[in-house]
Amino acid sequence: MDAPQQQIPDNISPAPVTLAQAFWYWLKLGFISFGGPAGQISIMHQDLVERKRWISERRFLHALNYCMVLPGPEAQQLATYIGWLMHRTWGGILAGTLFVLPSLLILIALSWVYIAFGDVPLVAGLFYGIKPAVTAIVVQAAHRIGSRALKNNGLWAIAAASFVAIFALNVPFPAIVASAALIGYIGGRVAPDKFRVEGGHGKANRSFGTALIDDDTPTPEHARFRWSELAKVIVIGGLLWLLPMALLTVTYGWGHTLTQMGWFFTKAALLTFGGAYAVLPYVYQGAVGQYGWLTPTQMIDGLALGETTPGPLIMVVAFVGFVGGYVNAIFGPDMLFLAGAMAAILVTWFTFLPSFIFILAGGPLVESTHGDLKFTAPLTAITAAVVGVIFNLALFFGYHVLWPQGFAATFDWPSALIALSAAVALFRYKRSVIQVIAASAVLGLILKILL
């Protein structure tokens, strides 16, 4: 229980935590992890560092800095890392899975309501208000990441170049990431000061009392680096990817929707540097432009659902999978829900599997990589490029919301009013994403009734 732990004197370590106790905490976290990565990391810090004292401030930030270097959702990876550090491999798998599972189940249910009843006036009115709010949220994301990442003219130039590349030249997102990484790698050697962004998540300078995993706690035996363990994780992780892909290919063929979803979201999982907003343009290019699994409007609606559910925002891929499987009726016209649910589960598997492999394989190597410029400079450049890509995403959403029928048609003034109101609420009054989306949904419903 939390209360007794709060009363433990600072100089006494809390009682050891069993795997069963950890299970209930990670399950609860999966249901309350709203607010994007910043909110999720804040919740874990308050619980695990300040209240429960499972891990010290310094060790928590050390783990977080490693997760920030990886592609994938850093909050989910941080939960996996801490679970692994406390309770070995199964502890990490349990923590990472429970972080995602509630949001997957909720999104499957909401996706079904959306696709089956989206034309009902009440649902249509709510989404009419949500879409402009999502546009403002993406603009805020670009501003938030940009203010943290663009610390000098060189990084601004990378951001501008990435925007031009994806907006004007339609360069694929993977090519932009690769180019930025190369620039960062070279720049880290030629002009290291330009790619050394200080600050990050701050320095570990606070203590909340003795923790189970404290600053001076020796590295657990299972967390020590061994080549045999590294090879074991890579082989098992590779088989967990290869066997489902082989089964899909043999059963349905390489060109089938499910097989292509597995392959596409594997690539997407390796490109999520900078958070979910960074990979959304790539998901749009593939899911909307290349494969036609869903429409631009549905993509915006999916992001809105992702913003209103717990778990990492990249869980929007579950919505993409559900809609693609449902609309394409991959199991026939009589099993539409099953098709959508299976596709959502499949894309979630392929999206998150790399995150587990990165943590379980790379955790023992954290000490040798943390703070090393040759590892962090490419990430700094990638993050700068991501700012330009997210700004392009904001323009894409704004176009489809404000000119839903194209520039030749009428400008949607009510949507513009909602978007402006949402932006003011986010930037001026610092309201949460959930509050902004809820208010915008009600406003959209009212405007739909009156107009």
Image (tube, rainbow, N blue to C red):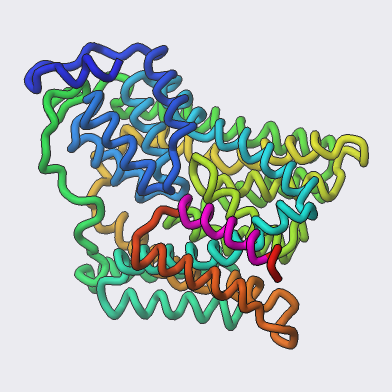
Which of the two residues, 293 or 297, is positioned nearer the viewer here?
297
Q: Can see residue 184? A: no
Is-magenta flag for residue 440? Answer: yes
Quarter containing the C terminus: bottom right
- The residue most toward the bottom is 408
Q: Does 115 appear above or below 26?
A: below
Which of the two residues, 227 or 55, is positioned nearer the viewer here?
55
Give the prevailing secondary structure in the magenta stretch.
Answer: helix
Residue 197 locus on image (x, y percent): 24, 63
Q: Give the residue drawn at x 37%, y 45%.
A: 39
Question: How many marks can you see?
Answer: 0
Q: Give the residue drawn at x 40%, y 42%.
A: 75
Which of the two residues, 317 or 105, is positioned nearer the viewer here?
105
Magenta extent: 434-447
Q: Give the residue drawn at x 41%, y 12%.
A: 20
Residue 302 locus on image (x, y percent): 64, 53
Q: Does 252 appear above or below 233?
A: below
Q: Can see residue 289? A: yes
- The residue most toward the front is 450
